[in-house]
């Protein structure tokens, strides 16, 4: 199953995860445009549980990278991973965060979501907030691409939400879900997708 995509969908096919950026600063108004696009995403009950923390300074990015790297090192040592591999992983994480012009923490808050008395429904409600934040994140990535920026989603905060919350001095109810690194791209990439028929059932 293959076809030529409709030109109106071009941005969906052009967006790629880019991790290397130029030194060109990203203007504040461009960041605000991207965030404004992000919050046009659908959300559960229209409660808009997404939260964003913007890190622009070198000091802020380094503090976050070092804190996350320390937790990563601790976890990998507990897994008895060879020290050389640990150092590579920690350095790669540090470089990705500190080399970005802007880092955006995408999180959620359950403050305005529904509260249930049983774990089954409360767990579903939390998943709904996660889905809402993820959709806002996808909007953010597409908006960045449309404005000529490169960006990449990092899932690492899911492994250390407490570390991210502390490093960024986030409110207690903010639950980090991902980091989006952002900047004007210094690379291009292509990406293959599995054939559609391997992922779809028609019923």
Image (tube, rainbow, N blue to C red):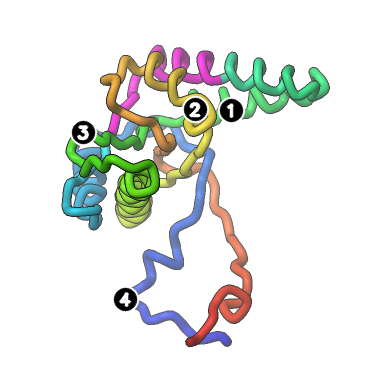
Residues at marks 1 and 3, CA–CA distance in whole angstroms = 31 Å
Sequence-wise first label, 3 or 2: 2
Q: Secondary structure at mark 4?
A: helix
Q: Are marks 2 and 1 in contact (CB under 8 Å)?
A: yes
Q: Secondary structure at mark 1?
A: helix
Q: Which residue is mark 1?
A: 93
Sequence-wise first label, 4 or 1: 4
Q: Residues within 10 Å of mark 3 (few under 14, many from 20)?
A: few
Residues at marks 4 and 1, CA–CA distance in whole angstroms = 35 Å
**65 over 184 or under it: above or below:** above
Q: Residues within 10 Å of mark 1 (few under 14, many from 20)?
A: some
Q: Which residue is mark 3?
A: 111
In the depicted view, which residue is nearer to us: 185 or 104? 104
Magenta highlight range = 52-68
Q: Which residue is mark 2?
A: 97
**124 over 93 or under it: above or below:** below
Q: Are marks 1 and 3 in contact (CB under 8 Å)?
A: no
């Amino acid at each position: 199953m293959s076809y030529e995509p409709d030109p109106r969908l071009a941005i969906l096919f052009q967006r790629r995860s880019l991790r290397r950026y130029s030194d060109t600063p990203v203007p504040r108004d461009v960041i605000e445009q991207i965030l404004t696009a992000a919050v046009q995403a659908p959300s559960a009950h229209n409660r808009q549980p997404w939260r964003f923390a913007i890190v622009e300074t070198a000091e802020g990015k380094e503090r976050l990278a070092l804190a996350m790297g320390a937790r990563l090192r601790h976890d990998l040592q507990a897994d008895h991973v060879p020290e050389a591999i640990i150092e590579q992983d920690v350095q790669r994480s540090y470089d990705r965060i500190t080399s970005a012009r802007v880092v955006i923490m995408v999180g959620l808050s359950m403050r305005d979501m529904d509260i249930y008395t049983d774990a089954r429904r409360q767990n579903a409600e939390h998943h709904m907030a996660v889905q809402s934040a993820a959709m806002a994140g996808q909007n953010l990535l597409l908006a960045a691409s449309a404005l000529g920026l490169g960006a990449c989603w990092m899932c690492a905060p899911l492994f250390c939400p407490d570390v991210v919350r502390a490093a960024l001095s986030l409110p207690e109810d903010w639950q980090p879900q991902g980091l989006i690194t952002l900047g004007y791209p210094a690379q291009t990439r292509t990406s293959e997708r599995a054939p559609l028929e391997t992922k779809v059932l028609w019923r």
